[in-house]
């Protein structure tokens, strides 16, 4: 019995040893797999609207970059409503996303919502519109004032070289857009260096194509002497271009502005749109996601990331046609 008992004891010890080894291997393997699989990051992106080409392209760039980097992108569309935009930022904070990209409608009014994100240790990436707040981890965008100044200098030279009569300038702006007001002011401050130029009126397109078209038509009707026009952004320029066509003013007006579209390219080809500042909006989105991922991982990112622009004229418009087919 003792011998049998000894054998049984030895067998039990051996079996227990094997089970412990197997259990340890299973546990270690499971733990390793769990450790190796990191949590998927979620990035919020609060845009301005999903109508204008600039915003749809910035979203496309962000979506493509998010897919490449294996992160989840949550896009919010406030449709030009600053209050709704703030609420969407707050909702993303409550959802505990890992970072938030914002293209601000109201650069001052958006700051409290951004501060909520920063207080929750969620990095905020501001694209396009410049937001002056410590809550912003990094700013991605063009120098809107400097770019409008360059366009203004182009207009000054154009007037000097091509116009025999004094320039009578009308503006189609978006007074609800901080960034477009900045462009408008920088442009006007520059073109006013041409002594013969007179600003006949500034109308508000409210960053909506149809509103901009109606405002532009009223501008033309009210100021038949107008022979030069400036539009501060894509909806304003599309609205202005549509008004020029509907009023048959192609031979009379020289048009300048921001952001290409099918209508703007057609105007360039026909000769009455003279120059348009073109941004590269997909870069805003892709660079925004790259910065968001780095910041979410506690990596360093430059405080300011500059995006390029191009002044498009009849000489280089062919390079951009494929974007608007």
Image (cartoon, rainbow, N blue to C red):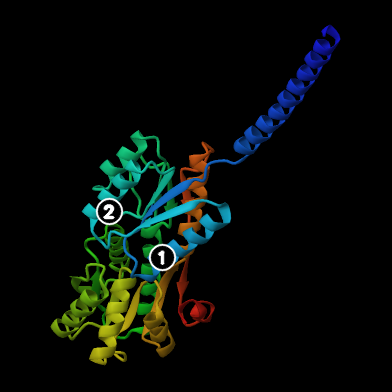
Figure quadrant of residue 241: bottom left
- Residue hosting label 2: 85
For the point 41% across and 76% down, the residue is 275
Mark 1 or mark 2: which comes first in sequence? Answer: 2
Q: Nearer the viewer, residue 226 or 10?
A: 10
* Depicted 69 relative to depicted 232: above or below: above
- Report whether 228 appears left or right of 286: left
Local crowd at mark 2 within 10 Å, few (<14), some, or many (≥20)?
Answer: many
* Depicted 48 relative to depicted 256: above or below: above
Q: Is residue 38 visible?
A: yes
Q: Which of 277 and 323 is in front in this view?
A: 323
- Residue hosting label 1: 150
Give the quarter of the figure containing the N terminus: top right
| Mark number displayed over residue 281 | none
Single out the residue that lies furthest toward the top: 2
For the point 71% across and 23% down, the residue is 20
Single out the residue that lies furthest toward the front: 1
SS class of the residue under badge 2?
helix
Local crowd at mark 1 within 10 Å, few (<14), some, or many (≥20)?
Answer: some
For the point 40% across and 86% down, the residue is 266
Mark 1 and mark 2 in contact? Answer it, CB < 8 Å.
no
Single out the residue that lies furthest toward the left: 222
Q: Depth-wise, is mark 1 or mark 2 nearer the camera?
A: 2
Q: Which of 151 and 317 is in front in this view?
A: 317
SS class of the residue under badge 1?
helix
For the point 76% across and 25% down, the residue is 18
* Horizontal and vertical percent position of residue 129: 35, 54
């Amino acid at each position: 019995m003792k011998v049998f008992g000894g054998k049984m004891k030895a067998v039990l010890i051996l079996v227990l040893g094997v089970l412990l080894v197997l259990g340890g291997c299973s546990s270690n393997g499971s733990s390793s797999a769990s450790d190796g699989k990191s949590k998927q990051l979620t990035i919020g992106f609060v845009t301005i609207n999903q109508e204008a080409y600039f915003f749809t392209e910035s979203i496309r760039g962000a979506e493509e970059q998010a897919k490449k980097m294996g992160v989840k992108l949550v896009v919010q569309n406030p449709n030009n409503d600053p209050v709704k935009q703030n609420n969407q930022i707050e909702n993303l904070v409550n959802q505990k996303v890992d970072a938030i990209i914002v293209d601000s409608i109201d650069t001052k009014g958006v700051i409290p919502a951004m501060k909520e994100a920063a207080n929750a240790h969620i990095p905020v990436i501001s694209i396009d519109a410049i937001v002056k707040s410590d809550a912003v981890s990094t700013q991605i965008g063009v120098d809107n004032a400097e770019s409008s100044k360059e366009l203004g200098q182009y207009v000054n030279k154009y007037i000097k070289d091509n116009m025999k009569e004094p320039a009578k300038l009308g503006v189609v702006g978006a007074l609800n857009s901080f960034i477009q007001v900045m462009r408008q002011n920088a442009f006007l401050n520059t073109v006013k260096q041409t002594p013969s130029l007179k600003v006949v009126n500034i109308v508000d397109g409210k960053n909506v194509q149809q509103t901009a078209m109606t405002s532009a038509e009223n501008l033309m009707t009210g100021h038949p002497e107008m022979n030069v026009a400036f539009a501060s952004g894509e909806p304003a320029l599309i609205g202005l271009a549509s008004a020029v066509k509907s009023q048959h003013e192609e031979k009379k007006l020289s048009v300048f502005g921001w952001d290409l579209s099918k209508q703007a390219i057609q105007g360039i080809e026909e000769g009455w749109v003279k120059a348009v500042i073109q941004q590269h909006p997909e870069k805003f989105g892709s660079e925004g996601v790259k910065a968001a991922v780095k910041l979410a991982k506690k990596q360093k990112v430059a405080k300011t990331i500059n995006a390029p622009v191009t002044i498009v004229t009849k000489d280089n418009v062919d390079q951009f046609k494929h974007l608007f087919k």
